C-alpha cells in the first residue's frame, strides 16, 4: 500500500482492542499519523488536547455513542471530516450521524481498502471546502481592497448605489463604462456585499471562447449531445447557483446566444445542449459592456428585448479623467499593494509625480493607472517615486498639450493659453528634470542662474525647490 498522500493525523475511537490494533496497523502503514481512544470521554479529551485532520468513530462505545463524540467535535471544529463505523444493527444511528454532519459511515465488518478510500475522499472533500473558503475570502479582500477608494462625488454616488443594490433582491444588473474603469471589481462588490456572499461568484468573459464552445460553457451539455460530449457537463450558470454570474463583454455575445440568455433571464430556467429537461436556477446576473448598447440595438447587432431586460438596473461607471480626485488615493493604494508584493520599500510619489498623474487623461482608466504604478514600483531605485519613474506617455502627453510642434518649435494652442502659467509650468518641468539643480535647470531653459532664481521667487517655488545647502554647482563639475 502506498503511503497516504495527505500524511494526515487521524483520531479513531473504538472500544474493541483487536479492531483498534488492526486499525492502528492499517492507518500507520498507509502513512497516517495515528492517535486513538476507547471511550467517548477519552475521545473528547483527545479532541480537546489536539484537533486531528480526520475523525473515525465507532458507534457503540462503553460510556455512550460515537454521536456524542461527533457533537463534541462539531462544537470545536464544524468542518472536521468524520467517518462512522457501525454494526449492521446500528445503521439508523449512522444515518443520524450523517444528518449531524458525518461525511460517511461503514458497516462492520469493513473492507480495509474501501475504508482507506473513504478516508481519502473525506480528506479531499475537507481540503476542497477549505480551498473554496480561501478563494471566497480572497475574493472578498479583492473587491474590498483600496481599488474601491472614492474621493470624487461621482464615484461616491456610484458606490452608494452599489451598496443599496447589493442588499436588494435585484437579479439583473447592467454595468456600463469604458474599458478599464473597474467593472469587474464592481461586479464582485455587488456579490460580496450581498446576502449571497457565501455562494459562488463566476467571472465569465463572453469573448474568451468561440460561439460554439461558449454555449456549452454557459449552459452545459448532456452526454452524446455532440461528437466530443463524452460525459454530462454542468454549465457555468448552473455552477453559480445561488450566487452571481458576471457576464463581461456581453455586447459581443452572438445574436443566437442573446436569445438563449433572454429566455433564461425571463424564465429562470434553461436546457443543457442535447437536454430535454428544464433546469431552474436562482442566481444574480451582472452583465457588463464598454459598448454603446443603444447604438448596437439600432444597428441590429443586439436584441432590443435583451437590452431592455438587462437595463432594469443600469450602473454607469465614470472614466478616471472625470474623477480626478480618485487618482492620488488609488495610486497610493497601488503603491502599497505592489510594494508588499515586490518586497520593496517605496513610500509613494513625490509632489511633482502626483501632479503628472493627475494631469494625465488616463485613456485606459484605472487599469492603466494600476499598470503604471506596478511598473514604477518594480523598477524603483529609491523609496520615493518621481516623474522619471512614470511611463513616458504620462509625462509626454502633458508636454504635447503645451504645444510642441512637429518641428520642435512652440505652437500656440487654438484655444489660447495664459503666458505666466506656461512660464511657471516650464520652470517646474525644468527643475523637476534637473532634480532641483538650478544650474542644470537654467541650461535646459537657456537662462542663467539669476534668471532661474528670480522666477523661482516670482512663482513662489522656493519651498518646492529649495537651493542646495552647499551651493548649486552640479556635482562632479567642480
Image: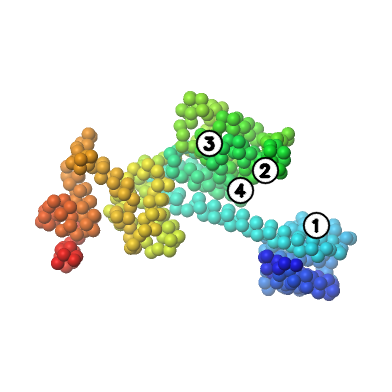
Which disc number belongs to residue 200? 4
Q: Quadrant of residue 118?
A: bottom right
Up/down of 273 relative to 380, above or below: above
| Disc 4, SS | loop
Task: Name the N-terminal-most of marks 3 and 1.
Answer: 1
Measured in 3D between alpha carbons, the distance from the residue under mark 2 to the one under mark 1, in whole angstroms, is 31 Å
Q: Nearer the viewer, residue 442 or 361?
A: 442
Which disc number belongs to residue 234? 2
Which dot, 2 or 4, sits closer to the camera?
2
Measured in 3D between alpha carbons, the distance from the residue under mark 3 to the one under mark 2, in whole angstroms, is 21 Å
Name the image quarter holding the C terminus.
bottom left
Query: Which residue is depicted at the point 22% across and 57% down?
Result: 434
Mark 2 and 1 residues: CB-CB less than 8 Å, in contact?
no
| Disc 1, SS | helix
Task: Name the N-terminal-most of marks 4 and 3.
Answer: 4
Q: Would residue 39 be found to the left or right of residue 439 on screen?
A: right
Is disc 2 surrounded by few (<14), some (14 to 19) or many (20+) residues within 10 Å?
A: some
Task: Name the N-terminal-most of marks 1 and 4.
Answer: 1
Query: Which residue is depicted at the point 52% across and 34% down?
Result: 252
Amino acid at each position: 500500500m502506498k503511503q497516504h498522500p495527505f500524511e494526515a493525523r487521524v483520531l479513531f475511537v473504538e472500544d474493541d482492542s483487536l479492531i483498534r490494533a488492526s486499525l492502528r496497523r492499517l492507518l500507520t502503514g498507509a502513512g497516517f499519523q495515528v492517535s486513538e481512544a476507547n471511550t467517548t470521554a477519552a475521545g473528547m479529551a483527545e479532541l480537546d488536547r489536539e484537533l486531528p485532520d480526520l475523525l473515525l468513530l465507532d458507534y457503540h462505545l462503553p460510556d455512550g455513542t460515537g454521536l456524542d463524540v461527533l457533537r463534541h467535535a462539531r462544537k470545536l471544529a464544524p468542518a472536521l471530516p468524520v467517518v462512522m463505523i457501525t454494526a449492521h444493527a446500528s445503521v439508523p444511528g449512522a444515518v443520524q450521524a450523517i444528518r449531524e454532519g458525518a461525511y460517511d459511515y461503514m458497516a462492520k465488518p469493513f473492507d480495509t481498502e474501501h475504508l482507506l478510500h473513504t478516508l481519502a475522499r473525506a480528506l479531499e472533500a475537507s481540503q476542497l471546502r477549505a480551498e473554496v473558503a480561501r478563494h471566497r475570502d480572497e475574493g472578498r479582500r479583492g473587491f474590498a481592497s483600496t481599488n474601491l477608494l472614492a474621493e470624487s462625488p461621482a464615484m461616491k454616488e456610484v458606490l452608494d448605489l452599489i451598496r443599496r443594490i447589493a442588499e436588494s433582491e435585484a437579479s439583473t444588473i447592467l454595468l456600463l463604462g469604458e474599458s478599464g474603469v473597474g467593472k469587474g471589481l464592481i461586479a464582485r462588490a455587488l456579490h460580496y456585499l450581498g446576502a449571497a456572499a457565501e455562494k459562488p461568484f463566476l467571472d465569465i468573459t463572453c469573448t474568451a471562447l468561440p460561439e460554439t464552445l461558449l454555449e456549452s460553457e454557459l449552459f452545459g451539455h448532456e452526454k452524446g449531445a455532440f461528437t466530443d460530449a463524452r460525459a454530462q457537463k454542468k454549465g457555468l450558470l448552473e455552477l453559480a447557483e445561488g450566487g452571481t454570474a458576471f457576464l463581461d463583454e456581453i455586447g459581443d455575445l452572438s445574436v443566437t446566444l442573446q436569445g438563449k440568455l433572454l429566455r433564461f433571464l425571463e424564465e429562470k430556467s434553461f436546457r443543457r445542449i442535447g437536454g430535454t429537461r428544464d433546469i431552474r436556477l436562482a442566481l444574480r446576473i451582472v452583465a457588463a459592456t464598454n459598448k454603446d448598447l443603444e447604438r448596437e440595438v439600432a444597428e441590429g447587432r443586439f436584441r432590443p428585448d435583451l437590452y431592455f431586460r438587462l437595463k432594469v438596473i443600469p450602473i454607469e461607471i465614470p472614466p478616471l479623467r472625470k474623477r480626478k480626485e480618485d487618482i492620488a488615493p488609488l495610486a497610493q493604494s497601488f503603491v502599497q499593494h505592489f510594494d508588499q508584493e515586490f518586497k520593496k520599500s517605496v513610500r509613494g510619489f513625490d509632489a511633482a509625480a502626483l501632479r503628472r498623474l493627475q494631469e494625465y487623461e488616463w485613456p485606459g482608466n484605472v487599469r492603466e493607472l494600476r499598470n503604471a504604478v506596478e511598473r514604477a514600483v518594480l523598477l524603483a531605485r529609491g523609496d520615493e517615486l518621481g516623474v522619471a519613474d512614470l511611463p513616458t506617455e504620462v509625462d509626454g502627453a502633458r508636454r504635447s498639450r503645451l504645444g510642441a510642434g512637429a518641428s520642435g518649435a512652440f505652437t500656440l494652442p487654438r484655444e489660447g493659453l495664459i503666458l505666466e502659467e506656461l512660464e511657471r509650468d516650464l520652470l517646474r518641468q525644468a527643475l523637476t528634470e534637473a532634480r532641483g539643480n538650478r544650474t542644470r535647470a537654467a541650461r535646459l531653459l537657456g537662462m542663467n542662474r539669476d534668471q532661474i532664481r528670480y522666477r523661482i521667487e516670482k512663482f513662489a517655488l522656493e519651498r518646492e525647490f529649495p537651493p542646495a545647502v552647499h551651493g548649486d554647482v552640479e556635482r562632479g563639475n567642480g
